[in-house]
Image (cartoon, rainbow, N blue to C red):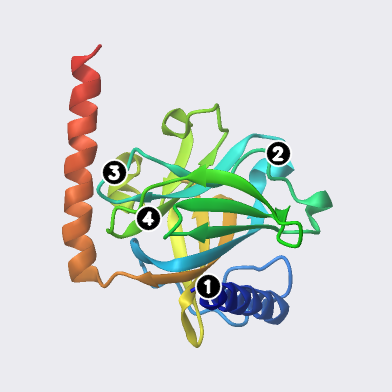
Amino acid sequence: MVKRKKFRLISLFSVLLSFLFLAGFPVKAGAVGFGPDDGSQLFNLGDVAVSVEIQDMGEVADVASEFGFFYITDPFNLITVFDFMDVSAGGATPQSALIDKSSGLVIDWDESNPAIPYFEIQSLFIDLGVPIGFYFAFDHDGDPLTDPFLSRTVSALNIGGLDLAQTYPAIGDPSTYLLEFGTATGGMLAMELVSGITPVPEPAALSMIALGLLAFGLHRRRCSGNM
């Protein structure tokens, strides 16, 4: 089991590196190796997934930011993959993280050293067995839910139901996506590369999003009742 997971991890990193090489670093939307935005909003998380941060405007603007994911039935529980402390060295070395579903761990891979072994734990989570969405919080104040710019891949959960994220599938690899997060005015906030996920087809995605909206509404009602 451990050997299989290690092989899967090496394979995922190899895939990501190959796409970075093909597209050129930093990766741009529409780069070689990626198809057009396919409108995916939810994804199934594999046993192991790998994420590489391609571009984060928070670093450029010296503003705290955060990237991560959430389970659609619990959209307020945001699970951090990269936080404001994850800064690329001069923008030349991309941040990387490992998402291990079975262990419920997000590991800051570029800060870890398996040879020791030492693993820097970024987040702990419990797999809910349902699809996930991704988010990017800009102008981060410590609570992503109150950030002025919180972009989710699920449009219905964004302010005004706006589409603030584009999802570009890797050509020839349905488990790798380039995620671009932006603002309502079309500004780009971040680009994240994730491998080890598969998109949820639209009919199933819509029903899951309806559950997410229900959880969203119940949370809002509870918060209003406590004020």
Q: Residues within 10 Å of mark 3 (few under 14, many from 20)?
A: some
Amino acid at circle 4: Gly
Dot 1 corresponds to which residue? 5
Distance of mark 1 from mark 2, alpha carbons? Answer: 37 Å
- 45 lies above or below 8: above
Under tag 3, what secondary structure?
loop
N-terminal-most mark, 2 or 4 = 2
Q: Residue at x 58, y 75 (%)?
A: 12
Out of 10 and 21, give the one closest to the viewer: 10
Question: In this orientation, does residue 153 appear?
Answer: no
**Left or right of 207: which side holds 181?**
right
Residue 218 position in % (x across, y down): 17, 33
Amino acid at circle 2: Ala
Amino acid at circle 3: Asp
Amino acid at circle 1: Lys
Quadrant of res 157: top left
Under tag 1, what secondary structure?
helix
N-terminal-most mark, 4 or 1 = 1
Residue 89 position in % (x across, y down): 81, 50
Q: Residues within 10 Å of mark 2 (few under 14, many from 20)?
A: few
- 227 lies above or below 6: above
Front label number (3 vs 1): 1
Front label number (4 vs 1): 1
Distance of mark 4 from mark 1, alpha carbons? Answer: 23 Å
**Left or right of 85: which side holds 122?**
left
Question: Looking at the rendered structure, which numbered label has been put on residue 61?
Answer: 2
Q: Residue at x 55, y 27 (%)?
A: 141
- 18 lies above or below 178: below
Distance of mark 2 from mark 4, alpha carbons? Answer: 26 Å
Under tag 2, what secondary structure?
helix
Q: Residue at x 34, y 39 (%)?
A: 159
